[in-house]
Protein backbone atom coordinates (compact mmCIF):
# COMPACT_ATOMS: atom_id res chain seq x y z
CA UNK A 1 0.00 0.00 0.00
CA UNK A 2 2.76 2.40 1.00
CA UNK A 3 4.71 1.51 -2.15
CA UNK A 4 1.67 2.30 -4.35
CA UNK A 5 1.19 5.71 -2.64
CA UNK A 6 4.84 6.54 -3.08
CA UNK A 7 4.57 5.78 -6.80
CA UNK A 8 1.54 8.09 -7.06
CA UNK A 9 3.39 10.94 -5.38
CA UNK A 10 6.35 10.42 -7.70
CA UNK A 11 4.08 10.53 -10.78
CA UNK A 12 2.31 13.67 -9.52
CA UNK A 13 5.62 15.37 -8.83
CA UNK A 14 6.97 14.45 -12.29
CA UNK A 15 3.86 15.85 -13.95
CA UNK A 16 4.05 19.07 -11.91
CA UNK A 17 7.75 19.48 -12.70
CA UNK A 18 7.03 19.01 -16.44
CA UNK A 19 4.44 21.80 -16.25
CA UNK A 20 6.98 24.06 -14.54
CA UNK A 21 9.62 23.36 -17.18
CA UNK A 22 7.06 24.07 -19.93
CA UNK A 23 6.46 27.48 -18.23
CA UNK A 24 2.84 26.52 -17.49
CA UNK A 25 3.19 28.14 -14.10
CA UNK A 26 -0.49 28.40 -13.16
CA UNK A 27 -1.03 24.68 -13.83
CA UNK A 28 2.25 23.90 -12.07
CA UNK A 29 1.11 25.75 -8.96
CA UNK A 30 -2.06 23.69 -8.85
CA UNK A 31 -0.14 20.45 -9.32
CA UNK A 32 2.54 21.28 -6.73
CA UNK A 33 -0.01 22.51 -4.18
CA UNK A 34 -1.27 19.00 -3.38
CA UNK A 35 2.29 17.80 -2.87
CA UNK A 36 3.14 20.54 -0.34
CA UNK A 37 0.94 18.86 2.29
CA UNK A 38 2.79 16.56 4.68
CA UNK A 39 2.23 12.83 4.23
CA UNK A 40 4.54 10.04 5.50
CA UNK A 41 4.50 8.52 2.02
CA UNK A 42 5.24 11.84 0.27
CA UNK A 43 8.99 12.44 -0.16
CA UNK A 44 8.46 15.74 -2.03
CA UNK A 45 6.89 18.39 0.29
CA UNK A 46 10.08 20.55 0.40
CA UNK A 47 10.62 20.37 -3.37
CA UNK A 48 6.93 20.89 -4.14
CA UNK A 49 6.85 23.93 -1.84
CA UNK A 50 9.99 25.34 -3.46
CA UNK A 51 8.70 24.99 -7.05
CA UNK A 52 5.28 26.25 -5.99
CA UNK A 53 7.03 29.40 -4.74
CA UNK A 54 9.09 29.73 -7.95
CA UNK A 55 5.95 29.31 -10.08
CA UNK A 56 4.22 32.06 -8.08
CA UNK A 57 7.28 34.31 -8.46
CA UNK A 58 7.31 33.81 -12.26
CA UNK A 59 3.63 34.77 -12.38
CA UNK A 60 4.29 37.96 -10.40
CA UNK A 61 2.73 36.76 -7.16
CA UNK A 62 5.64 37.92 -5.03
CA UNK A 63 3.74 37.87 -1.74
CA UNK A 64 2.59 34.26 -2.32
CA UNK A 65 6.12 33.20 -3.24
CA UNK A 66 7.62 34.95 -0.22
CA UNK A 67 5.16 33.34 2.18
CA UNK A 68 5.87 29.86 0.82
CA UNK A 69 9.66 30.34 0.95
CA UNK A 70 9.41 31.57 4.55
CA UNK A 71 7.27 28.53 5.34
CA UNK A 72 10.01 26.24 3.94
CA UNK A 73 12.59 27.96 6.20
CA UNK A 74 10.33 27.42 9.19
CA UNK A 75 9.24 23.80 8.49
CA UNK A 76 12.43 22.44 6.91
CA UNK A 77 15.33 24.47 8.38
CA UNK A 78 17.91 21.73 7.65
CA UNK A 79 16.87 21.12 4.04
CA UNK A 80 19.96 20.85 1.85
CA UNK A 81 18.51 23.25 -0.73
CA UNK A 82 18.22 26.15 1.73
CA UNK A 83 20.76 28.28 -0.17
CA UNK A 84 18.40 28.26 -3.18
CA UNK A 85 15.47 29.19 -0.94
CA UNK A 86 17.41 32.11 0.54
CA UNK A 87 18.57 33.28 -2.89
CA UNK A 88 15.03 33.59 -4.22
CA UNK A 89 13.78 35.07 -0.98
CA UNK A 90 16.57 37.66 -1.17
CA UNK A 91 15.58 38.53 -4.74
CA UNK A 92 11.92 38.98 -3.75
CA UNK A 93 12.85 41.30 -0.87
CA UNK A 94 15.04 43.36 -3.19
CA UNK A 95 12.25 43.64 -5.75
CA UNK A 96 9.95 44.89 -2.99
CA UNK A 97 12.63 47.46 -1.98
CA UNK A 98 12.96 45.77 1.41
CA UNK A 99 16.73 46.04 1.17
CA UNK A 100 17.69 45.44 4.79
CA UNK A 101 15.63 42.24 4.95
CA UNK A 102 17.07 41.10 1.63
CA UNK A 103 20.63 41.65 2.81
CA UNK A 104 19.91 39.79 6.03
CA UNK A 105 18.76 36.78 4.02
CA UNK A 106 21.75 37.13 1.66
CA UNK A 107 24.11 36.94 4.64
CA UNK A 108 22.71 33.46 5.38
CA UNK A 109 23.89 32.07 2.01
CA UNK A 110 27.24 30.43 2.71
CA UNK A 111 27.84 28.32 -0.42
CA UNK A 112 30.72 29.93 -2.39
CA UNK A 113 29.12 28.90 -5.69
CA UNK A 114 26.28 31.36 -5.04
CA UNK A 115 28.45 34.40 -4.35
CA UNK A 116 28.91 35.52 -7.95
CA UNK A 117 25.17 35.44 -8.67
CA UNK A 118 24.45 37.06 -5.32
CA UNK A 119 26.85 39.91 -6.05
CA UNK A 120 25.18 40.49 -9.41
CA UNK A 121 21.79 40.49 -7.71
CA UNK A 122 22.92 43.09 -5.18
CA UNK A 123 24.57 45.21 -7.88
CA UNK A 124 21.36 45.40 -9.90
CA UNK A 125 18.97 46.16 -7.04
CA UNK A 126 21.14 48.32 -4.76
CA UNK A 127 21.77 50.58 -7.76
CA UNK A 128 18.05 51.45 -7.61
CA UNK A 129 18.43 53.11 -4.22
CA UNK A 130 18.41 56.87 -4.71
CA UNK A 131 18.87 57.91 -1.07
CA UNK A 132 22.45 58.39 0.15
CA UNK A 133 21.55 58.00 3.83
CA UNK A 134 19.88 54.61 3.17
CA UNK A 135 23.05 53.32 1.50
CA UNK A 136 25.18 54.68 4.34
CA UNK A 137 22.99 52.83 6.85
CA UNK A 138 23.30 49.63 4.81
CA UNK A 139 27.09 49.97 4.77
CA UNK A 140 27.10 50.56 8.54
CA UNK A 141 25.32 47.22 9.02
CA UNK A 142 27.27 45.37 6.30
CA UNK A 143 30.70 46.96 6.46
CA UNK A 144 32.31 44.48 4.05
CA UNK A 145 29.63 44.52 1.36
CA UNK A 146 31.36 45.58 -1.84
CA UNK A 147 28.14 46.06 -3.81
CA UNK A 148 26.67 48.36 -1.18
CA UNK A 149 29.91 50.37 -1.33
CA UNK A 150 29.74 50.42 -5.14
CA UNK A 151 26.16 51.71 -5.08
CA UNK A 152 27.03 54.41 -2.53
CA UNK A 153 30.08 55.62 -4.46
CA UNK A 154 28.07 55.75 -7.68
CA UNK A 155 25.30 57.77 -6.03
CA UNK A 156 27.78 60.11 -4.34
CA UNK A 157 29.56 60.49 -7.67
CA UNK A 158 26.39 61.79 -9.30
CA UNK A 159 26.17 64.66 -6.81
CA UNK A 160 27.16 68.19 -7.82
CA UNK A 161 30.86 68.58 -7.17
CA UNK A 162 30.34 71.04 -4.31
CA UNK A 163 28.30 68.44 -2.42
CA UNK A 164 30.52 65.43 -3.02
CA UNK A 165 31.92 63.76 0.07
CA UNK A 166 35.35 63.29 -1.41
CA UNK A 167 36.98 61.70 1.64
CA UNK A 168 34.25 59.06 1.90
CA UNK A 169 34.39 58.38 -1.84
CA UNK A 170 38.17 57.97 -1.79
CA UNK A 171 38.12 55.68 1.25
CA UNK A 172 35.49 53.39 -0.32
CA UNK A 173 37.26 53.29 -3.68
CA UNK A 174 40.47 52.24 -1.92
CA UNK A 175 38.94 49.77 0.55
CA UNK A 176 36.91 47.85 -2.06
CA UNK A 177 39.24 48.40 -5.05
CA UNK A 178 36.45 50.00 -7.10
CA UNK A 179 36.95 51.66 -10.53
CA UNK A 180 36.77 55.45 -10.09
CA UNK A 181 36.28 56.29 -13.76
CA UNK A 182 33.22 54.03 -14.04
CA UNK A 183 31.52 55.27 -10.88
CA UNK A 184 32.25 59.00 -10.56
CA UNK A 185 30.29 60.90 -13.19
CA UNK A 186 30.71 64.34 -11.61
CA UNK A 187 34.41 64.33 -10.76
CA UNK A 188 35.74 67.17 -8.61
CA UNK A 189 37.48 69.57 -11.00
CA UNK A 190 41.11 70.56 -10.76
CA UNK A 191 41.88 73.93 -9.11
CA UNK A 192 41.99 76.88 -11.49
CA UNK A 193 45.18 78.58 -10.34
CA UNK A 194 46.09 82.11 -11.48
CA UNK A 195 48.87 84.63 -11.14
CA UNK A 196 46.40 87.24 -9.88
CA UNK A 197 42.90 86.79 -8.47
CA UNK A 198 40.24 89.48 -8.90
CA UNK A 199 38.10 90.27 -5.85
CA UNK A 200 35.10 92.51 -6.53
CA UNK A 201 33.80 94.45 -3.53
CA UNK A 202 30.17 95.51 -4.07
CA UNK A 203 29.49 97.65 -1.01
CA UNK A 204 27.73 100.85 0.03
CA UNK A 205 30.82 103.08 0.02
CA UNK A 206 28.55 106.13 -0.46
CA UNK A 207 31.45 107.89 -2.15
CA UNK A 208 29.35 110.89 -3.22
CA UNK A 209 28.60 111.77 0.39
CA UNK A 210 32.12 111.34 1.79
CA UNK A 211 34.18 114.29 2.93
CA UNK A 212 37.79 114.46 4.14
CA UNK A 213 36.87 115.48 7.71
CA UNK A 214 37.84 113.10 10.57
CA UNK A 215 34.20 112.87 11.68
CA UNK A 216 32.86 109.32 11.85
CA UNK A 217 30.87 108.56 8.70
CA UNK A 218 27.42 106.95 8.72
CA UNK A 219 28.80 103.98 6.78
CA UNK A 220 32.03 103.93 8.78
CA UNK A 221 31.97 100.15 9.24
CA UNK A 222 32.09 99.69 5.44
CA UNK A 223 35.09 101.97 5.14
CA UNK A 224 36.78 100.14 8.02
CA UNK A 225 36.19 96.78 6.34
CA UNK A 226 37.70 98.16 3.12
CA UNK A 227 40.76 99.55 4.91
CA UNK A 228 41.40 96.16 6.49
CA UNK A 229 40.95 94.37 3.16
CA UNK A 230 43.40 96.65 1.33
CA UNK A 231 46.01 96.17 4.03
CA UNK A 232 45.61 92.38 3.77
CA UNK A 233 46.02 92.50 -0.01
CA UNK A 234 49.31 94.39 0.49
CA UNK A 235 50.44 91.81 3.05
CA UNK A 236 49.57 88.89 0.76
CA UNK A 237 51.42 90.42 -2.19
CA UNK A 238 54.63 90.25 -0.13
CA UNK A 239 53.91 86.53 0.31
CA UNK A 240 53.53 86.02 -3.45
CA UNK A 241 49.72 85.93 -3.44
CA UNK A 242 48.37 88.63 -5.73
CA UNK A 243 44.85 89.99 -5.34
CA UNK A 244 43.31 92.77 -7.39
CA UNK A 245 40.60 94.49 -5.34
CA UNK A 246 37.88 96.12 -7.45
CA UNK A 247 35.56 98.43 -5.50
CA UNK A 248 31.96 99.03 -6.72
CA UNK A 249 29.76 101.48 -4.85
CA UNK A 250 26.18 100.16 -4.86
CA UNK A 251 25.03 103.08 -2.65
CA UNK A 252 22.80 100.62 -0.79
CA UNK A 253 20.44 100.60 -3.75
CA UNK A 254 18.90 97.58 -5.48
CA UNK A 255 18.66 99.61 -8.71
CA UNK A 256 22.38 100.44 -8.72
CA UNK A 257 23.28 96.87 -7.69
CA UNK A 258 21.45 95.63 -10.81
CA UNK A 259 23.45 98.08 -12.93
CA UNK A 260 26.72 96.78 -11.45
CA UNK A 261 25.68 93.22 -12.26
CA UNK A 262 25.40 94.24 -15.91
CA UNK A 263 29.08 95.26 -16.03
CA UNK A 264 30.85 92.77 -18.31
CA UNK A 265 34.07 93.06 -16.27
CA UNK A 266 32.32 91.60 -13.22
CA UNK A 267 32.27 88.22 -14.98
CA UNK A 268 36.06 88.11 -14.66
CA UNK A 269 35.90 88.26 -10.85
CA UNK A 270 37.07 85.20 -8.92
CA UNK A 271 35.35 86.30 -5.73
CA UNK A 272 32.56 88.81 -5.12
CA UNK A 273 32.08 90.33 -1.66
CA UNK A 274 28.87 92.14 -0.86
CA UNK A 275 26.51 93.89 -1.05
CA UNK A 276 26.26 93.48 2.78
CA UNK A 277 22.47 93.84 3.01
CA UNK A 278 20.07 91.01 2.26
CA UNK A 279 17.53 92.99 0.28
CA UNK A 280 20.18 93.93 -2.30
CA UNK A 281 21.74 90.47 -2.49
CA UNK A 282 19.32 88.76 -4.91
CA UNK A 283 20.76 90.23 -8.16
CA UNK A 284 24.28 89.25 -7.12
CA UNK A 285 23.20 85.77 -6.02
CA UNK A 286 21.62 85.18 -9.43
CA UNK A 287 24.67 86.63 -11.21
CA UNK A 288 27.15 84.54 -9.21
CA UNK A 289 25.15 81.36 -9.79
CA UNK A 290 24.79 81.99 -13.54
CA UNK A 291 28.51 82.74 -13.94
CA UNK A 292 29.81 80.29 -11.33
CA UNK A 293 31.60 82.96 -9.31
CA UNK A 294 32.29 82.61 -5.57
CA UNK A 295 30.16 84.96 -3.50
CA UNK A 296 30.40 86.14 0.12
CA UNK A 297 27.40 88.41 0.74
CA UNK A 298 28.56 89.86 4.05
CA UNK A 299 31.79 88.99 5.92
CA UNK A 300 30.31 90.07 9.27
CA UNK A 301 26.99 88.19 9.01
CA UNK A 302 25.96 84.87 10.61
CA UNK A 303 22.74 84.64 8.59
CA UNK A 304 22.68 81.45 6.49
CA UNK A 305 19.68 82.80 4.55
CA UNK A 306 22.14 85.07 2.73
CA UNK A 307 23.65 82.14 0.84
CA UNK A 308 20.44 80.17 0.23
CA UNK A 309 21.11 76.99 -1.73
CA UNK A 310 23.70 78.45 -4.09
CA UNK A 311 26.77 76.18 -4.42
CA UNK A 312 28.98 79.24 -4.94
CA UNK A 313 27.84 81.38 -1.98
CA UNK A 314 29.34 81.11 1.51
CA UNK A 315 29.58 82.81 4.88
CA UNK A 316 32.84 83.98 6.40
CA UNK A 317 31.32 83.78 9.88
CA UNK A 318 29.80 80.68 11.49
CA UNK A 319 26.05 80.61 10.90
CA UNK A 320 23.65 80.90 13.82
CA UNK A 321 23.00 77.18 13.35
CA UNK A 322 26.70 76.37 13.65
CA UNK A 323 27.15 78.53 16.76
CA UNK A 324 24.30 76.64 18.42
CA UNK A 325 25.80 73.26 17.45
CA UNK A 326 29.36 74.12 18.53
CA UNK A 327 28.06 75.56 21.82
CA UNK A 328 26.32 72.27 22.53
CA UNK A 329 29.57 70.43 21.73
CA UNK A 330 31.44 72.64 24.17
CA UNK A 331 28.90 72.20 26.98
CA UNK A 332 28.80 68.42 26.53
CA UNK A 333 32.59 68.19 26.62
CA UNK A 334 33.47 70.74 29.31
CA UNK A 335 30.62 71.01 31.83
CA UNK A 336 30.52 67.98 34.19
CA UNK A 337 26.89 68.40 35.27
CA UNK A 338 24.78 67.42 32.26
CA UNK A 339 21.75 69.60 33.00
CA UNK A 340 21.21 72.80 31.09
CA UNK A 341 18.82 75.75 30.74
CA UNK A 342 18.34 77.84 27.60
CA UNK A 343 17.23 81.45 27.23
CA UNK A 344 16.75 83.10 23.85
CA UNK A 345 15.30 86.34 22.49
CA UNK A 346 12.35 86.87 20.19
CA UNK A 347 14.39 87.33 16.99
CA UNK A 348 14.55 84.59 14.37
CA UNK A 349 18.34 84.28 14.73
CA UNK A 350 18.01 83.65 18.47
CA UNK A 351 15.40 80.95 17.88
CA UNK A 352 17.55 79.26 15.22
CA UNK A 353 20.59 79.26 17.48
CA UNK A 354 18.62 77.97 20.48
CA UNK A 355 16.85 75.21 18.52
CA UNK A 356 20.12 73.87 17.10
CA UNK A 357 21.74 73.98 20.53
CA UNK A 358 18.87 72.12 22.19
CA UNK A 359 18.61 69.44 19.51
CA UNK A 360 22.34 68.73 19.47
CA UNK A 361 22.73 68.93 23.27
CA UNK A 362 20.05 66.27 23.70
CA UNK A 363 21.83 64.09 21.13
CA UNK A 364 25.03 64.45 23.17
CA UNK A 365 23.37 63.43 26.44
CA UNK A 366 22.89 66.92 27.92
CA UNK A 367 19.48 67.21 29.57
CA UNK A 368 17.89 70.53 28.63
CA UNK A 369 15.53 70.92 31.58
CA UNK A 370 14.20 74.38 30.73
CA UNK A 371 14.01 76.62 27.66
CA UNK A 372 12.29 80.00 27.40
CA UNK A 373 11.86 82.74 24.83
CA UNK A 374 12.34 86.04 26.64
CA UNK A 375 10.57 89.22 25.55
CA UNK A 376 11.07 92.68 26.99
CA UNK A 377 7.94 92.49 29.10
CA UNK A 378 8.77 88.99 30.38
CA UNK A 379 12.48 89.44 31.14
CA UNK A 380 11.79 89.65 34.89
CA UNK A 381 10.98 85.94 34.75
CA UNK A 382 14.73 85.23 34.54
CA UNK A 383 15.27 86.65 38.02
CA UNK A 384 12.16 84.85 39.29
CA UNK A 385 13.38 81.49 37.97
CA UNK A 386 17.05 81.77 38.89
CA UNK A 387 17.25 84.08 41.89
CA UNK A 388 14.08 83.50 43.96
CA UNK A 389 15.58 82.79 47.39
CA UNK A 390 14.03 80.35 49.88
CA UNK A 391 16.62 80.53 52.67
CA UNK A 392 18.82 83.34 54.06
CA UNK A 393 21.76 83.63 56.42
CA UNK A 394 21.85 85.92 59.46
CA UNK A 395 22.88 88.88 57.26
CA UNK A 396 19.92 88.36 54.92
CA UNK A 397 22.10 86.92 52.15
CA UNK A 398 20.33 84.17 50.17
CA UNK A 399 21.72 80.70 50.81
CA UNK A 400 19.17 78.57 48.92
CA UNK A 401 16.84 79.16 46.00
CA UNK A 402 13.67 77.82 44.43
CA UNK A 403 15.96 76.37 41.78
CA UNK A 404 18.35 74.44 44.03
CA UNK A 405 21.99 75.52 44.08
CA UNK A 406 24.29 73.45 41.86
CA UNK A 407 21.32 71.62 40.33
CA UNK A 408 22.10 73.10 36.89
CA UNK A 409 25.39 72.68 35.06
CA UNK A 410 25.06 75.41 32.45
CA UNK A 411 22.85 78.10 30.95
CA UNK A 412 23.05 78.77 27.21
CA UNK A 413 21.95 82.27 26.24
CA UNK A 414 21.18 82.45 22.52
CA UNK A 415 20.94 86.24 22.27
CA UNK A 416 22.99 89.41 22.15
CA UNK A 417 20.21 91.33 23.89
CA UNK A 418 21.74 92.93 26.98
CA UNK A 419 18.39 92.90 28.76
CA UNK A 420 18.49 89.09 28.65
CA UNK A 421 22.13 88.22 29.28
CA UNK A 422 22.62 90.85 32.01
CA UNK A 423 19.73 89.39 34.00
CA UNK A 424 21.15 85.89 33.62
CA UNK A 425 24.60 87.06 34.77
CA UNK A 426 23.19 89.01 37.72
CA UNK A 427 21.02 86.08 38.77
CA UNK A 428 23.91 83.62 38.65
CA UNK A 429 26.08 86.05 40.61
CA UNK A 430 23.35 86.18 43.29
CA UNK A 431 23.27 82.37 43.44
CA UNK A 432 27.06 82.01 43.84
CA UNK A 433 27.00 78.43 42.63
CA UNK A 434 28.78 76.49 39.89
CA UNK A 435 26.57 77.31 36.88
CA UNK A 436 28.52 78.03 33.68
CA UNK A 437 26.98 80.67 31.40
CA UNK A 438 27.61 80.16 27.68
CA UNK A 439 26.96 83.18 25.49
CA UNK A 440 28.11 85.28 22.53
CA UNK A 441 31.22 87.34 21.82
CA UNK A 442 29.01 90.37 21.09
CA UNK A 443 28.48 90.69 24.86
CA UNK A 444 31.94 92.26 25.06
CA UNK A 445 30.90 95.22 22.90
CA UNK A 446 29.64 98.30 24.74
CA UNK A 447 28.04 96.35 27.56
CA UNK A 448 27.08 97.87 30.90
CA UNK A 449 27.95 94.61 32.66
CA UNK A 450 31.28 94.87 34.44
CA UNK A 451 33.76 92.36 33.02
CA UNK A 452 34.66 91.26 36.55
CA UNK A 453 31.18 89.76 36.71
CA UNK A 454 31.95 87.73 33.60
CA UNK A 455 34.82 86.11 35.45
CA UNK A 456 32.95 85.60 38.73
CA UNK A 457 30.01 83.93 37.00
CA UNK A 458 32.07 81.65 34.74
CA UNK A 459 30.84 83.30 31.53
CA UNK A 460 32.12 81.49 28.43
CA UNK A 461 31.64 83.09 25.02
CA UNK A 462 31.46 81.59 21.53
CA UNK A 463 34.00 83.81 19.81
CA UNK A 464 34.93 83.07 16.18
CA UNK A 465 36.45 86.56 15.82
CA UNK A 466 38.64 86.47 18.93
CA UNK A 467 42.13 87.78 18.23
CA UNK A 468 44.79 86.99 20.86
CA UNK A 469 46.32 90.44 21.49
CA UNK A 470 49.81 89.05 22.07
CA UNK A 471 49.94 87.07 18.81
CA UNK A 472 52.79 88.36 16.64
CA UNK A 473 50.60 88.47 13.52
CA UNK A 474 48.14 90.72 15.33
CA UNK A 475 50.91 93.00 16.60
CA UNK A 476 52.27 93.29 13.04
CA UNK A 477 48.80 94.04 11.67
CA UNK A 478 48.20 96.71 14.31
CA UNK A 479 51.57 98.33 13.66
CA UNK A 480 50.97 98.46 9.87
CA UNK A 481 47.45 99.80 10.37
CA UNK A 482 48.65 102.59 12.68
CA UNK A 483 51.38 103.56 10.20
CA UNK A 484 48.83 103.65 7.39
CA UNK A 485 45.90 105.34 9.14
CA UNK A 486 47.31 106.93 12.27
CA UNK A 487 44.85 105.12 14.53
CA UNK A 488 44.28 101.72 16.08
CA UNK A 489 42.33 99.21 13.97
CA UNK A 490 38.69 98.81 14.96
CA UNK A 491 36.66 95.58 14.87
CA UNK A 492 35.49 95.80 11.26
CA UNK A 493 38.97 96.67 9.97
CA UNK A 494 40.29 93.54 11.69
CA UNK A 495 37.51 91.40 10.18
CA UNK A 496 38.14 92.82 6.70
CA UNK A 497 41.86 92.08 7.06
CA UNK A 498 41.27 88.52 8.29
CA UNK A 499 38.71 87.80 5.56
CA UNK A 500 41.10 88.70 2.77
CA UNK A 501 44.06 86.97 4.43
CA UNK A 502 42.15 83.69 4.78
CA UNK A 503 40.45 83.68 1.40
CA UNK A 504 43.55 84.94 -0.36
CA UNK A 505 45.32 81.83 0.93
CA UNK A 506 42.34 79.65 -0.05
CA UNK A 507 42.34 81.08 -3.59
CA UNK A 508 46.08 80.45 -3.88
CA UNK A 509 45.77 76.83 -2.71
CA UNK A 510 42.39 75.70 -4.07
CA UNK A 511 42.02 78.02 -7.04
CA UNK A 512 39.40 80.39 -8.37
CA UNK A 513 36.89 77.52 -8.18
CA UNK A 514 37.58 76.79 -4.49
CA UNK A 515 33.91 76.25 -3.61
CA UNK A 516 34.09 73.18 -5.86
CA UNK A 517 37.63 71.97 -5.15
CA UNK A 518 38.06 72.51 -1.40
CA UNK A 519 37.11 69.33 0.54
CA UNK A 520 34.62 69.59 3.38
CA UNK A 521 36.21 70.17 6.81
CA UNK A 522 39.29 71.77 5.23
CA UNK A 523 40.93 74.01 7.83
CA UNK A 524 42.75 77.20 6.90
CA UNK A 525 44.75 78.79 9.75
CA UNK A 526 43.91 82.39 10.50
CA UNK A 527 46.29 85.32 10.69
CA UNK A 528 44.53 87.11 13.55
CA UNK A 529 41.92 84.52 14.58
CA UNK A 530 41.99 80.75 15.07
CA UNK A 531 41.07 80.22 11.42
CA UNK A 532 38.38 78.99 9.04
CA UNK A 533 36.94 75.50 8.71
CA UNK A 534 35.06 74.91 5.46
CA UNK A 535 31.82 72.94 5.91
CA UNK A 536 29.27 71.32 3.60
CA UNK A 537 26.83 74.12 4.46
CA UNK A 538 29.44 76.71 3.39
CA UNK A 539 30.08 78.55 6.64
CA UNK A 540 32.87 78.61 9.22
CA UNK A 541 32.79 75.54 11.45
CA UNK A 542 35.60 76.88 13.65
CA UNK A 543 34.14 78.39 16.86
CA UNK A 544 36.62 78.96 19.70
CA UNK A 545 35.36 79.70 23.22
CA UNK A 546 36.85 82.33 25.49
CA UNK A 547 36.56 83.28 29.15
CA UNK A 548 38.12 85.69 31.63
CA UNK A 549 40.96 84.39 33.81
CA UNK A 550 42.69 86.79 36.17
CA UNK A 551 41.17 89.67 34.24
CA UNK A 552 42.38 88.49 30.82
CA UNK A 553 40.49 86.83 27.99
CA UNK A 554 41.83 83.39 27.15
CA UNK A 555 40.81 80.64 24.74
CA UNK A 556 39.66 77.58 26.69
CA UNK A 557 39.56 74.87 24.06
Image (spheres, rainbow, N blue to C red):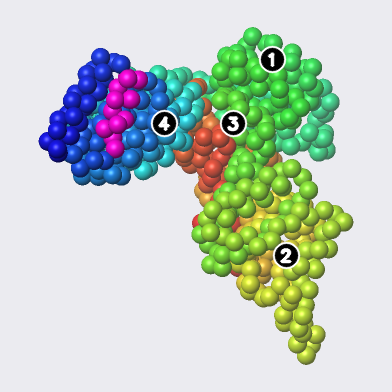
Q: Quadrant of the N terminus?
A: top left
Q: What element carries label 3?
A: strand
Residue position marked by numbered label 2 in the rendering: 425
Q: Residue at x 57, y 51 (%)?
A: 360
Kindly report the distance in space between the C-alpha atoms of the residues bearing marks 3 and 4. 50 Å
Depth check, mark 3 against mark 4: the one in front is: 4
Depth check, mark 2 against mark 1: the one in front is: 2
Query: On the image, which quarter does residue 17 sit in?
Result: top left
The reply to whether the C-beta atoms of the residues labelled 3 and 4 are less than 8 Å apart is no
Q: Is 26 one of the magenta-colored residues?
A: yes
Residue position marked by numbered label 1 in the rendering: 261
Q: Residue at x 18, y 29 (%)?
A: 8
Kindly report the distance in space between the C-alpha atoms of the residues bearing marks 2 and 4. 65 Å
Q: Is 551 one of the magenta-colored residues?
A: no
Residue position marked by numbered label 4 in the rendering: 63
Depth check, mark 1 against mark 3: the one in front is: 3
The residues colored magenta run 25-37
- The first of marks 3 and 4 along the sequence is 4
The reply to whether the C-beta atoms of the residues labelled 2 and 1 are less than 8 Å apart is no
- The first of marks 3 and 2 along the sequence is 3
Question: Looking at the image, which residue sits at the far bottom?
Answer: 394
Q: What element carries label 1?
A: helix
Q: As drawn, is 215 to the left or to the right of 260?
A: right
What's the magenta bit mostly, secondary-structure-wise? helix
Amino acid sequence: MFHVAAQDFKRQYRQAKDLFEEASYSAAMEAFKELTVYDPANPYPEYASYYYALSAERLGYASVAKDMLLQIKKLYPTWDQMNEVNYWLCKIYFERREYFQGLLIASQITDPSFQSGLSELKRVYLANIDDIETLKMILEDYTQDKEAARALVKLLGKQPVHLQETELIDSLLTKFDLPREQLITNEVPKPILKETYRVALVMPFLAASLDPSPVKKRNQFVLDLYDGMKLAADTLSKMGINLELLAYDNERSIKITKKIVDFEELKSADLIVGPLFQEESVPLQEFALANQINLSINPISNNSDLIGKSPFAFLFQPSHETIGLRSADWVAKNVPRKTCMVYYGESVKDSVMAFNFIKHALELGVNVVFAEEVRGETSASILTTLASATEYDEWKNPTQFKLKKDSIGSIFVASDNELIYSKVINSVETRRDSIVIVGQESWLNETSVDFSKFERTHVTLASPNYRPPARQAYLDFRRKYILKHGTLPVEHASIGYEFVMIFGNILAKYGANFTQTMPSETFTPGSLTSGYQWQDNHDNGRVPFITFKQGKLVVID
